[in-house]
Image (tube, helix red, strand yellow):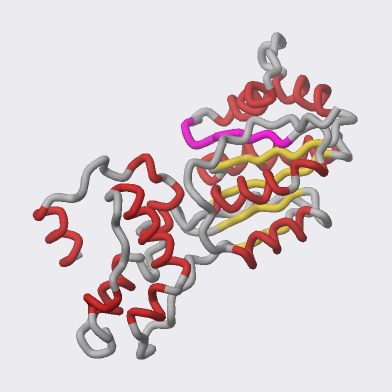
Amino acid sequence: MGRHLSNLPTELTSFVGRREELREVKRLLTSTRLLTLTGSGGVGKTKLALRAAADMSRGFPDGVWLVLLGSIDDPLLVAQAVLSALGVQDLSAGLSLSSLTEYLAGKRLLLVLDNCEHLLDACAVLAGTLLAACPDLHVLATSRQALGVAGEVRMVVPPMSLPGEGEEVSVQRLLGSDAVWLLCERAAAVVPGFAPRPAALGDGRHDGQPERLRGLCGAGRPTGCAAAGNRPRLWPARPPSASTRSMTATA
């Protein structure tokens, strides 16, 4: 029919960097049925998972379905969240996992379970049960920790690339790194017309400018630049005030 079933959100920002990681996720998904992307909060696990799932949607005729678990506190509601994401109404109170297993039997689809870390046991039971009963099901999970299910493959998502600590590096080289590229792109979305001007920063080898840029991108602290890239809706709708700039510069 040419129609691909999915509830994946439309990307509102471009996909910056992560080309090698993206290729690896897609490669692993062809050979394993449970792949968990792990890493620190804000490092970019969700965006990487969504792009990989979208790229591979043609291989799943019954759809690619995103299950958002971040707002769920009750482990008993995990199976219900999956049913809701699939658009299935569960009428069997207390038997959501049984209903889900029955619904998915014989279907070839990809489930993307996002933010599993606070529901590890429930997600592990869900994934293990479904994968055992549904041979054509694939699961791509994001979590700060692996689920611990038999057959699970874990891929660690590192912070975006920056030149190594202690290297003598020019501003121009930093501007070519994924993390700074992302920072500049997101800044341009908030401040129309924004563009980095290496000439205005000088050579940058001896005046501390590379280290300041490195700090803005959160080297070793992925919640900085990466979090901004994954959750641009949390950025202010106006340029930061002078006090905010001062706090950022001294953080």
The residue located at (58%, 41%) in the rendering is 114
Magenta part mainly helix, strand or loop?
strand
The N terminus: image quadrant: top right
The location of residue 194, given as percent across then percent down, is 29, 57
In this rendered view, identify the residue nearer to me: 237 or 192. Answer: 192
Residue 160 in magenta?
Answer: no
Q: Is residue 146 above or below residue 131?
A: below
The location of residue 34, given as percent across then percent down, is 74, 49
Total numbered labels: 0
Kindly indicate the quadrant of the structure image that contains residue 11. top right
The residue located at (28%, 71%) in the rendering is 197
The location of residue 49, given as percent across then percent down, is 62, 49
The residue located at (35%, 66%) in the rendering is 218
Kindly indicate the quadrant of the structure image that contains residue 235. top left
Q: Is residue 170 above or below residue 190?
A: below
In this rendered view, identify the residue nearer to me: 124 or 51. Answer: 51
Q: Residue furthest left?
A: 243
The residue located at (77%, 53%) in the rendering is 29
Magenta segment range? 64-71
Q: Is residue 214 left or right of residue 59?
A: left
Q: Residue furthest top?
A: 91
The location of residue 41, given as percent across then percent down, is 45, 53
Q: Is residue 130 left or right of residue 208?
A: right
